[in-house]
Amino acid sequence: MKIIPKSREAISGTGAVTPSLVKNVTELKKLPVRLKVQFDGSAVYVPENLMDKFVIRGGNPLLGTIRVSGAKNAALPAMAAAILTDETLVLENIPDVRDIQTERNLLVSMGAEVELGYGRAHHRTTISCRSLVNPEAAYELVKTMRASTLVLGPLVARMGRARVSLPGGCAIGARPIDLHIKGLEQLGATIRQEHGYIEASADRLRGGHIAFDKITVTGTEDLMMAAALAQGETLMENCAREPEVVDLAVLLNKMGAKIEGAGTSTIRIKGVSKLGGARHRIIPDRIEAGTFVIAAALTGGDLTITNCDPLHLNALLQKLEECGVTTTTTGDSIRVKNGHRLKAADMSTEEYPGFPTDMQAQYMALATQAEGTSIITENIFENRFMHAQELVRMGANIKVEGSRAIVRGHTPLSGAAVQCSDLRASASLVIAALVAEGETILDRVYHIDRGYERIEEKLRGANGQIRRIGEMLPKRTQVPAGVA
Ligand code: UD1
């Protein structure tokens, strides 16, 4: 297929998606394009809308209902798990966000066949890694999404070798992958580091004892996948207990793995020689749900967040109660009705089940409007206060001292031109803009598109005044009610 670069319009082609096509696409640097693999195996190349902005007018309470998408952080390891088998994985509730597109491109670049559902099934992804030809995660992909390193363990386990780019630094801190590497060595892999790449090899991984020096979410997931196909038993200690780790273990066990203890700090894995296909529904995105909970509380709205799991949000809901926010939950929804004044409450981020670092920025936006002073301590990442300066530009009173931010609340916010620096920082700026006086222009919204599925449409449907400008993507076709 020939790719003719044309800006501002979608370029479509037909034919199977092959690794060389993906390479062509990533090499089209002057025109950043996104590869969308379609149900019939053909590809559509869409120019990336890197310069999109949000225009947000504050002052409206969020009302009605918002439905939460599948968890990006559960979908990413689930897709990597497809590498472990030559059979097909069918994954439901996959969110339509940029990180997922990046992972699809990564899998396709290795030789995987990735098929997307369409219409009502557009959140379904079917992956077959029957014939993997290229066990490599190139720098071009890893630098845009660090979770690409999740393919390291599965590749060594299934193919006996892997070449994965080191991620390097990122906006929120150093984020090394030394614990992934050390763990793989415990499982018998030989690791070399050259030209910015990790090269790992092993004839067959063998079970071992992995005691993590520090709790790591993707590290736990990566090694759990590797150990699932190792010879013998693996004991992993000081593991991450996040719901996404549990979801991955559930999927792996459906594929034939023998994993016990996921969700606790000790995981035991009896290696098997082969894993098979499975069908699995990804858990709801707790961070997306939490973002809407905070937005509703801050705007004084009455919002019901559906298709979520309130149990995964315990730490946040408890903290909000301290702040004077009333929430009521059912098995799969949270209603936030806030007519009260917000009260300041100190908060420290911790590994699950503690308060998530991925909700720290959004909580800071809330703290700017609470009565009193909140001290926010970031314990997971060393440089995760980039949003503070942007919030200050909107009128907040925040002082950052090392890993602490001191937020003096109840200062009026006013709309300003602000910039997204990373995914969750962007979410906090959207939330702040919803209560700011006047208009906020939010630049670099590609950060938010990495992990939130059409956030502007969801907020608009709940009385938020937000629109995207500079949009280049083709509009989705609306199916009239009662037709499909
Ligand atoms: C995952 C989440 C991310 C979340 C983070 C913490 C995914 C795809 N991403 O990221 O949204 O913010 O958990 O909840 O699930 N560390 C090391 N060496 C390692 C690995 C990690 O020192 O080999 C450090 C990190 O620098 C960080 C801490 O451990 O300070 C926790 O990081 P980790 O849990 O690994 O984060 P991710 O899995 O990358």
Image: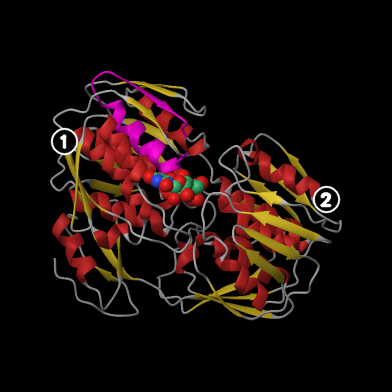
- Where is residue 263 shown, x and y percent of the image? 51, 29
Residue density around tag 1, few if under 14, some if 14–19, many if 20 or more, within 10 Å: some
- Where is residue 305 shown, x and y percent of the image? 66, 48
Work out whether residue 184 or residue 213 is closer to the camera in this orientation and state it.
213
Q: Is residue 470 above or below residue 67?
A: below
List the single residue furthest toward the front.
Answer: 402
Residue at (36% x, 31% y) in the render: 224
Q: How many numbered callouts?
A: 2
- Left or right side of 247 for 389: right
Amino acid type at mark 1: Gly
Work out whether residue 302 or residue 234 is closer to the camera in this orientation and state it.
234
Report, in whole angstroms, how far the alpha carbon at label 1 lies from the one at label 2.
54 Å
Determine which residue is flagged by label 2: 324
Tell me which numbered mark, 1 or 2, is placed earlier along the sequence: 1
- Disc 1 residue: CB within 8 Å of ligand 1: no
Disc 2, SS: loop
Q: Is 222 inside the magenta-drawn segment?
A: yes
Determine which residue is flagged by label 1: 160
Residue at (65% x, 39% y) in the render: 310
Work out whether residue 418 or residue 336 is closer to the camera in this orientation and state it.
418
> Disc number at residue 208?
none
Amino acid type at mark 2: Gly
Q: What stretch is highlighted in magenta?
A: 214-239
Residue at (52% x, 57% y) in the render: 382
Q: Is residue 140 above or below residue 335?
A: below
Colour scheme shown: secondary structure
- Where is residue 402 shown, x and y percent of the image? 59, 61
Residue density around tag 2, few if under 14, some if 14–19, many if 20 or more, within 10 Å: some
- Where is residue 49 shown, x and y percent of the image? 40, 73
- The quarter holding residue 92 reads top left
Q: Quadrant of the N terminus?
A: bottom left
Disc 1, SS: loop
